[in-house]
Amino acid sequence: MTSATQTLGPEGPLAEALDNFQPRPEQQEMAAAVEDALANQGTLVAEAGTGTGKTFAYLVPVLQSERKVLVSTGTRNLQDQLYHRDLPLLRRALGADFRTALLKGRANYLCIHRLERAVYQERELSGEQRADLARIREWAGHTTHGDRAEVTSLAEDAAIWPRVTSTSDNCLGTECEHYDDCFLIQARRRAQEADVVVVNHYLFCADLNLKSEGVGELLPKADAVVFDEAHQLPEAASRFFGTGISSYGLRELARDSRDEFAQEAGDDPQLPEAAHALERAAGDWRRALGEGDWRGAWKPVLEQPAPRQAFDALRAAADRLQNVLEIHAERGKGLARCFDRAKDLNERLNFLYDADDPDFVFWMETRGRGAFVHATPLEVAGPFQRATGGAKGQAWVFTSATLAVGESFTHFCARLGLPGDVATRKWESPFHFDEQARLYHPPRLPDPGNPAYTDRLLDAALPVVAASPGGAFFLFTSHRALRQAAHRLRREGRFPLLVQGDAPRDHLIHQFRSKGNAVLLGTGSFWEGVDVRGAALSVVVIDKLPFPSPADPVIEARDRYLKEKGLEPFPHEHLPTAVLTLKQGAGRLIRDASDAGVLIIGDPRLTRKTYGKTFLASLPPMPRTYDLNEVKRFLGQETPDEAPAPTPQSNYREEDSGGAGEGQGTLL
Ligand code: SF4
């Protein structure tokens, strides 16, 4: 049989069938390692730098293995890309006959039962929601798969979607009269029959969670699981091994109970009253938590009189609704489901009220009109290993461009509880970073805690943006710094400006690409998963080393937990997390072999602190400079009249530059 290496080689079918296919040694090596893991039911942790071609490096051996394989990705976009683009391409190139299926979380599929209900209750909807509902009804008439990604004319976060999609709480399951035509059930059936099923980490973890609770499963059994964007897996697992409540969920249960009761022509006034009381209690609870968006530890909040009273009232209202629902549960499937949900809600409320399970951190947040309480597991390694059965009898491949800190995979493996002797491999990006990129570390920026820091960073970065042939990403570690930068850049009006929060993320990225010379300001989600090729993205500015905030309740609790285990949080958690985040951010710059650009890292700790070496060792090997003129020359802008960069000031200590002083125009 042809090996994956041969398939991906210069004489292989891909080179023959695909115009732009370039055989790459890194890709072939990775494919051989994946092939080996599949054949031996082994576990492989593989970091593949940008441009390695890791997607084909795992898909080719997966397809040639003739085994049933789940491929799990970090995002729905990547799922769509794999299913609609990469797999059909390989099917054609390999001339192979394999069945594939795409399976997303249930919120992605139209629920016929809920659509009918939304139509029945149309009068309750706003004008905008009614217009959106009309579009969904029109689409529902001809869709084959009921995947809401098909409705490109509706925003992903349109308020109508929760009304016409299901949750595990409100789905009627086998009791549903639309069960046989249900889009979700059909997608699951296709997944059962397929050779390769493309899922996402959230769905995978939801499935693990259900299995570990012994209440069913969402995914088919497979011989192997490949996780792409595996660095996102611990976070997804942490979400699904935790629990919580939200004021939205409470209101939804109240509304569904009332609606189901009305549909069953119920005449007991107790039920609408109990539902209304729960809705009111949810609103009172949100108000008792004060205005604005914030997050913090849950227990201290529960000790304050007003939030405590509001939470007590909430529990009483939820308890009463459960009792009334129990009386009417036999009237219909919908009411029976509401009763189950109320029972589950009360269990969660009690768990959060006690907040004494030592394996969890209890925290809360408010966002707009919503209030949320979460119980997040302090570590996911144990639950993940228990739920996966230690990966026995299956092959596991974890891959991403950012798994290693320097050469070490210890941090990633420890988070998922993978054994210390698991096979790990790392392939550097084949791009020529020495020719394609520069790392500019502006001299004499103040300490990142200095109030003038963001302004000084802009002073240093904007000349580079002005000299570049395209646009720039500014990646911030805080919303405050982002707002400060946005305020100044709006006032100055020098560049087309796109700011996170002004429009949905995908829309901003689309605009960024089409403008070609825009400046985009973003935090969190813009640090990864953004792929802008060509001159449109010529500069990436990172404001600070992205250490997690020690004041965050989850970080704080986890720090305590690590200390109790005798581990220092900084080297074990904060530093590796920040290094991997920085790698993600830096990875936005060079996306293909013809890209060129400048990475600007402002934070002076990169070279002043000893740990800066760990960051530098993990970045792609791009030459580092402190000299603006050097950067401009690199960007193709001649600077004959410019004065040389000033010499360093005495308050700037250079510890890690290998002896070269800053501002001397030296490429380090
Ligand atoms: S089975 Fe569940 S998801 Fe499917 S149509 Fe019925 S209620 Fe909706």
Image (cartoon, rainbow, N blue to C red):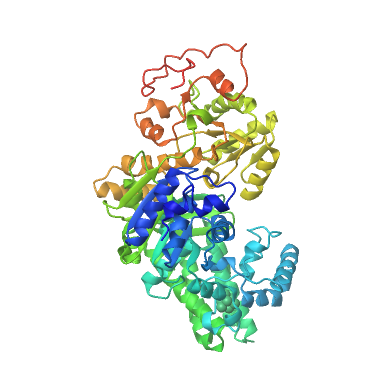
Is the residue 239 above or below the residue 23 in the image? below
Residue 107: where, in percent of width, then height? 57, 66
Q: Residue at x 59, y 48 (%)?
A: 19
Q: In the image, 566: left or right of 513?
A: left
Taking 260 as reference, is 314 above or below it? above
Q: Which quadrant of the figure shows ligand 1?
A: bottom right
Estimate the x, y position of residue 185 in percent, counting from the top left: 55, 76
Residue at image location 36% in from the left, 38% down from the top: 406
Residue found 73% across the figure and 72% down from its top: 123
Q: Is residue 69 left or right of residue 510?
A: left
Q: Is residue 521 or residue 220 the one in the foreground?
A: 220
Query: Which quadrant, please, contains the N terminus?
Result: bottom left
Taking the image as drawn, is residue 548 in sight?
no
Quarter in which the C terminus is drawn: top left
| Farthest residue, direction front | 11
Vertical position of residue 42 compared to residue 98: above or below: above
**Toward the viewer: 30 or 570?**
30
